[in-house]
Amino acid sequence: MRKNILWALVVVASALIQTTWLDVIRLQGVLPDLTLLLVLYFAMFHGEERAMFTGLLAGLYQDVAGNSLLGHHIVCHVLVGFWVARLAHRLITEHPAVKVGVVLCAGVVHGTLYTCIQYVLTPDMSALHAIFATVLPGAFYTALVTPVVFLVLARSLRFDEEAFQGGAP
């Protein structure tokens, strides 16, 4: 039970940081996607179910806090989380370069999927410009901060069973 409460608090806190304080590290109008990193962390190390629930909760918060219709971030996070979790079964995800590569590819897929959804709703937007101006730099920036964020998550989210079953830590 404590594990699930800790998980929910971390997801909500990261979504809150993503929508408020992360503007401090904005470079050329691009931000790293902290909630996507959280979804990918759980996808790589805790499986599809945890990744999809993380995507649901983080996407719901981003949709409510942002200026988009309800469901856009949810769909993108859940789909990318599921695909990465399925792919992680086949990869050696302990190497930092593999983690960064997976995050880079997932960031591009996530951003492209979100841009396609936006394009369907507003066909007058320039989808290719959005992909090249924000999606690719954003995915690259997110991939750059991956080792630090994953290290912080691994150290702070001790999901080992004896720590949560009342045993000695």
Image: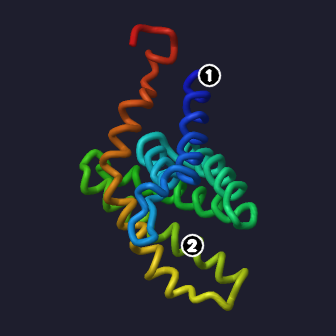
- The image quadrant of residue 152 is top left
Where is residue 7 shown, x and y percent of the image? 56, 34
Say what amino acid the circle numbered 1 marks. Answer: Met
Where is residue 78 shown, x and y percent of the image? 60, 56
Which residue is identified by label 1?
Answer: 1
Q: Residues within 10 Å of mark 2 (few under 14, many from 20)?
A: many
Residue 160 in the figure: left or right of residue 126: left
Secondary element under disc 2, as helix, strand or loop, is helix
Residue 10 in the figure: left or right of residue 132: right
Residue lying at 46% horizontally and 21% vertically, measured from the top left: 161
Say what amino acid the circle numbered 2 marks. Answer: Leu
Which residue is identified by label 2?
Answer: 113
Residue 17 in the figure: left or right of residue 145: right
Which residue is nearer to you in this view: 153 or 65? 65
* Residue 85 visible to an observer of this rendering: no
Q: Earlier in the sequence, mark 1 or mark 2?
A: 1
Q: Quadrant of the C terminus?
A: top left
